[in-house]
Amino acid sequence: MIVGVGIDVVDVARFGVSLSRTPGLTDRLFTPEEAERPLASLAARFAAKEALAKALGAPEGMHWHDAEIRSEESGRPVFEIRGSVLRRANDLGVGSVHVSLSHDAGIASAVVVLES
């Protein structure tokens, strides 16, 4: 059963400006492993974290590092959730988190589906 759905889009250039003009923002939003990725990939990962927050009902006290996107060997993105995000997912009865990322023509997007 579907427990939640979230979607988000990010203007890649605008996101890059935000990262460059706000000291420490990259470190607040991304784990060290995520932060090594190129800008379009970071924008897509941020969109995914926002989409996850929406799918979870925007839980208060959510920590960005508690939702890390890793890539399987095939390249498929997967969420590794822990802490505040895992607690909220457990409260909702989430058994699986599905994520799809895309970036093209200066726009990054993500869709998250939570399944029991």
Image (spheres, helix red, strand yellow):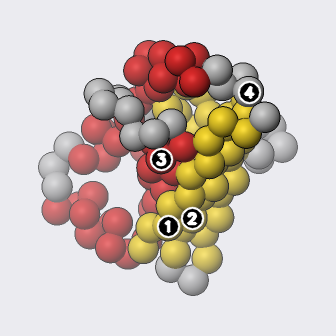
Q: Is residue 69 left or right of residue 60?
A: right
The image position of residue 41, as x and y in percent, is 54, 57
Identify the image quadrant of residue 10: bottom left
Q: CA distance from mark 2 to mark 1?
A: 4 Å
Amino acid type, callout 3? Lys
Q: Secondary structure at mark 2?
A: strand
Q: Which mark is residue 9?
A: 1
Tell me which label, 2 or 3, sits earlier in the chain. Answer: 3
The image position of residue 30, as x and y in percent, is 40, 39
Within 10 angstroms of label 2, few (less than 14), some, or many (20 or more) residues? many
At 28% across and 38% down in the image, what residue appears? 28
The image position of residue 12, as x and y in percent, is 43, 71
Which quarter of the rendered picture does the N terminus lie within? top right
Amino acid type, callout 4? Ser
The reply to whether residue 72 is in sight is: yes
Above-or-below relation of 116 to 51: above
The image position of residue 11, as x and y in percent, is 42, 73
Q: CA distance from mark 2 to mark 4?
A: 24 Å
Callout 2–callout 1 Cβ contact below 8 Å = yes
Which quarter of the rendered picture does the C terminus lie within? top right
- Residue at the disc numbered 3: 54
- Residue at the disc numbered 4: 116
- Residue at the disc numbered 2: 109
Q: Nearer the viewer, mark 2 or mark 3?
A: 3
Tell me which label, 3 or 4, sits earlier in the chain. Answer: 3
